[in-house]
Each structure stands twice: as C-alpha cells, then as structure tokens.
Amino acid sequence: MATIPATGARTGEQFLDGLRGDAREIWMNGERITHPLEHPGLEAAARSVARAFDLQHEHADEMLYPSEKTGQPVNVSHTIPRSREDLERRRRSFELTAAMSGGMMGRTPDYLNVTFACFAGASSVWARRGNEQGAANLVAYHELMRDCDLSTTHSIMNPQVDRTKPEAEQAMGQVALHKVGETENFITVRGARMLATLGPFADDLNVYPGSDIRPQDGRYALAFAVPMGTPGLKLICRDTYARQRPAFDYPLSSRFDEMDCVVIFDDVDVPKERVFLDGDTVGYSEVISDTGWRGHITHQAFTRAYVKLSFALGLGHTIANMTGVVRFDHIQEKLGQIWNMAELTRSALVSAEAGARLDEHGVFYPDDRPMLALRGEMPKWLPRCHELLQLIGGGGFMCTPSEADMQGPLRELIDTYYQAAGGDAERRIRLFRLAWDYVGSELGSRSELYERFYLSDSWRMTAVAYQIADKSFPESLVEQFLHD
Ligand SMILES: Cc1cc2nc3c(=O)[nH]c(=O)nc-3n(C[C@H](O)[C@H](O)[C@H](O)COP(=O)(O)OP(=O)(O)OC[C@H]3O[C@@H](n4cnc5c(N)ncnc54)[C@H](O)[C@@H]3O)c2cc1C
C-alpha cells in the first residue's frame, strides 16, 4: 500500500506520483485501471486535479499557511477557522480552485478538507457516549489529510434499493454498508455506497453519515477512512465523459470529468485507528447536525457555485454579444436572471461571513441562514442557467464544426458563413462549443444532475431550512393582531 509522506502542500507531480504503487481496484467498462494517467478516459481529469495542487504553490500567499503540527506550508482549506479573516482567506482559496474549471469540478480536494477540518474542530461531538478514541482518531486523520496533502473522496449514501425502507430492511440488509466482524486491530465492513466522485483521483476514501438511522441499526452506523488500495475495496466507474478530442472541440469534457463511482466493500478490514464512529446511531445524526458541517461545507460549495454562475453569465453575455441578440430586452432579462443568481450567491457568502461567530467549540462558524436558503435554491438555479443559456444561444449550439473541419478544405467557406456580429467564425465556433460543453454534452448533463443532487435534493433541503428557521419574528407579526 503506497504511503504519502508528510511533506505539506504537494505539487501536481507529487500528487500524480502518490497514486502509483498501491493495489487499488478501480474498474471501468470491464477494465481494471492501474493509474488514471494510463487510462485515456481519466488522464485529462487527473492532470486537472494535479493542476489544483500546483495552483496552491502559484498562489502561496493566499492558499497556504504553516501547519499547526509540522510548520510546513499546507492548504488553507484545512484551517479550523478561528476568526472572520480565516473564513475570508479560506473563501478566496475556494474561489481560486473553482475558477480553474469554471466551477465544473465540484469535488476538488478542498471539499473534503473543509469537512474534516469542521469535524476535527468539533471533535467533542464525536467523543460523545464514550467515543473518545473515535474522536482522537478523527483529529489525527484531519492532521494526516492536511500534512500529507491527501486527495480524498467520500461516499455517504447507500444504494437506491428501496428508498421507502430503512437500510436494514432492503435486500435483507445486505446492500447498505454495514459491519460484519471485528478483531483486535480491525473492523470488517461489507456492502456498497453511492457515489464517490473523484474516486480514481483519490488517495483515500472517507465514509461518514449521510442520513439518519434507526436505533436498532447500529451495524450501519459507521464512519471511517481507508486508503484506496485497501484489499476488498472496489470502485466501479460510470462511462467516461472525457472526450478524447481536441480541447477546441470539447474544452470542458477534454479536461474536467471528475468521474463518479459506486463503491463496493467486499469484506474490507478497516484499521481501528481509522475508525471514527462504530455503532452509535445517535452520534450518526449528531455529527452532521452538531459539528457545524452545514455552514462550513456550504461555504466551499456556494463559493464554487458563485464561480459557476459567473461562468454561466460570462457564456450568456458573450454569446448574446456575438450574435447581436443582446439588444433584445427579453434576452437582457435572461442575462439579468443569471446575474441575479450570481449576485445573490455572492451576497449570501458575504452575509454568512459578516454574521459569523465563535461557536461552542471555539470555531468561527459562518452564519448558516443565507446558506440554508441557498441550499434549497441552488439545485434549481444552476439547472435553470442551462435552460437560459439554451434560450439565449438558440440553434447556434448546432453550428459548430470541429477542429478537423476547421483544418479541412471547407475552412474558407466556414470563415464566411459562420461569422457573427461579435467575432470571426473561429471565435464564434469556439464559444458555442464551450457553451455546449457546459449545457448539453454528456459532461454538461452530468453537471446539471450533480447540481440537483450532490447536497441532497432541493425539496427536502428547503423543508429542513423551514424546520430549523427562527420563526419568532414572523410569528410576532401575526400575533399582534390576534389579541384585540
Ligand atoms: C453526479 C453526482 C455525484 C455525486 N457524488 C457524490 C459523492 O462524491 N459522494 C456521495 O456521498 N454522494 C454523491 N452523490 C450522491 C448524492 O449524495 C445523492 O445523489 C443524493 O444524496 C440524493 O440521493 P439519491 O441520488 O439516491 O436520490 P434518491 O434519494 O433516491 O431520490 C430520488 C428522488 O426521490 C425523492 N425521494 C427519495 N427519498 C425521498 C423521501 N424520503 N421523501 C421524499 N422524496 C424522496 C427525491 O427527492 C428525488 O426526487 C452524487 C450524486 C450525483 C448525481
């Protein structure tokens, strides 16, 4: 099993080297993948993840800080924030990482870095009901992630066997991930989880709670981390959406397919020092509700969403100017809708930071109210951008000869007949191909699905926002008229 040395912030090359040499079992289309660089469907995205590692060195002032343990520079997404400035710095780092892909890569390593920094900052929640060792393991793991600069994936949902039943009652309880044995040094787990985005590009897999669990289902209440090369761990990839075509043809698909996998635990031994929770069904929901995870993860997620909305606005604005439709007021209104979404997201982030406060764990916690409101809306807003871009671009998305066409005998005709008010034929074709990769290619469609579901669905999240909202002011406004 490969071991990543604790060198602090890694370069892209060090990250790619770190994926070599373990016995990982990643499968795609019947083929076992030894290293993502050796698979044409994964190579480009591996280089993009590597780019995220290089980025932290290029922006060291903004993205690195000295590790509390080793003093070496490490990524600020590992910070346990103690001040508003820590939050602002962390957001800037999220923004730089997201901008690299126009927000198309949702699961760059900063996503889980924030999660585990949040968990470690509230380790007393994990320690409840006698789980002091699990909490200590979690704090040590957060330090390992930070000081070894790990790339990790996570898998928190059980498969869709029958969503109307508890895990233990679906398929005789066999499918959902559960514990089947224990020795002095290991627990053994079996079952499956969906999904693990970034799986082929991860050093470790993290498992932590994703839903509530019944008191009698303790064997399903698990949180742990294992290296990807752990025997029995198998990841099955969906089809690759990485087009092995020039960047001209598919500017996004040729770079940013972060991949989604189903994870099968075929009797996996998890070392006890990597177990954070084992059997505590109450703790299983408390680590999500009481650690501040909601506010911290949405700080990363909606910074990326702000970048992606801005990218959508840039696409719509450039297309509308390219074809002249920007002069129509209903097109301006559509562009305005995208701007509204981006601006409300930016405002929510500013508001969350402005209203942040020290919580009971001594961690600076973003005001989660604007984030909870966005958590219901964002899964509708980003798909709506796809629709708005289609309405702005019309059939232009289909007027897109490939790079091979551009280099062929028809080039002169293409230059004449594909020109536009706002640019020559090549610029117009490049732009529409880029926008199609955002809204319509396989990667674009996957991206829309991702936005709808990666933080659970919009409907249930809106209901949760309502349930936990402070309703005292609205109630008081009504009450004052009910007592005359
Ligand atoms: C592209 C992509 C990448 C992802 N990456 C990851 C990842 O890296 N790690 C990870 O852990 N997860 C990941 N997820 C999974 C994500 O967490 C789940 O998709 C999400 O939790 C929703 O669950 P589900 O997809 O099983 O849908 P379901 O829960 O099966 O929902 C399907 C439909 O049924 C409705 N429904 C289901 N149950 C109920 C209910 N009880 N009450 C009312 N309505 C209900 C839903 O609203 C929805 O409309 C990813 C998902 C996608 C699409």
Image: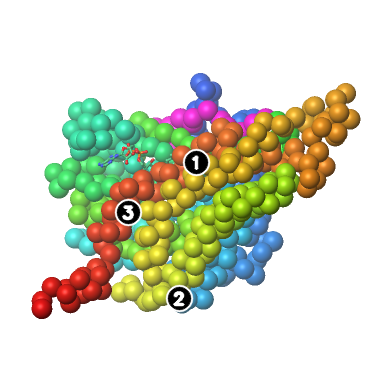
Can residue 233 be found in the magenta stretch?
Answer: yes
Which one is in front, 318 or 103?
318
- Within 8 Å of ligand 1, the CB of disc 3? no
Quadrant position of residue 142: bottom left
Up the image or down, 175 lies above or below 133; here it is above
Q: Earlier in the sequence, mark 2 or mark 3?
A: 2
Q: Residues within 10 Å of mark 2 (few under 14, many from 20)?
A: some
Q: Earlier in the sequence, mark 1 or mark 2?
A: 2
Which one is in front, 454 or 420?
420
Residue ID at (86%, 28%): 413
Q: Earlier in the sequence, mark 1 or mark 3?
A: 1
**Lateral position of residue 22 relative to residue 10, left or right:** left
Which residue position is annotated with label 3?
462
The amino acid at mark 1 is Glu
The amino acid at mark 3 is Thr
Residue ID at (69%, 61%): 58
The amino acid at mark 2 is Ala
Image coordinates of residue 119 in percent, x first then y, are 37, 61
Q: In the rendered structure, find residue 448 and report the number of the disc placed on it.
A: 1
Magenta region, residue range:
227-244
Image coordinates of residue 23 in percent, x first then y, are 50, 34
Image coordinates of residue 115 in percent, x first then y, are 42, 57
Can residue 65 be found in the magenta stretch?
Answer: no
Quadrant position of residue 264: top left
Q: In the rendered structure, find residue 354 and report the number of the disc placed on it.
A: 2
Up the image or down, 364 lies above or below 182; here it is below
Residue ID at (79%, 27%): 404
Q: Residues within 10 Å of mark 1 (few under 14, many from 20)?
A: many
**Lateral position of residue 206 relative to residue 74, left or right:** left
Give the CA separation, mark 2 to mark 3.
Answer: 23 Å
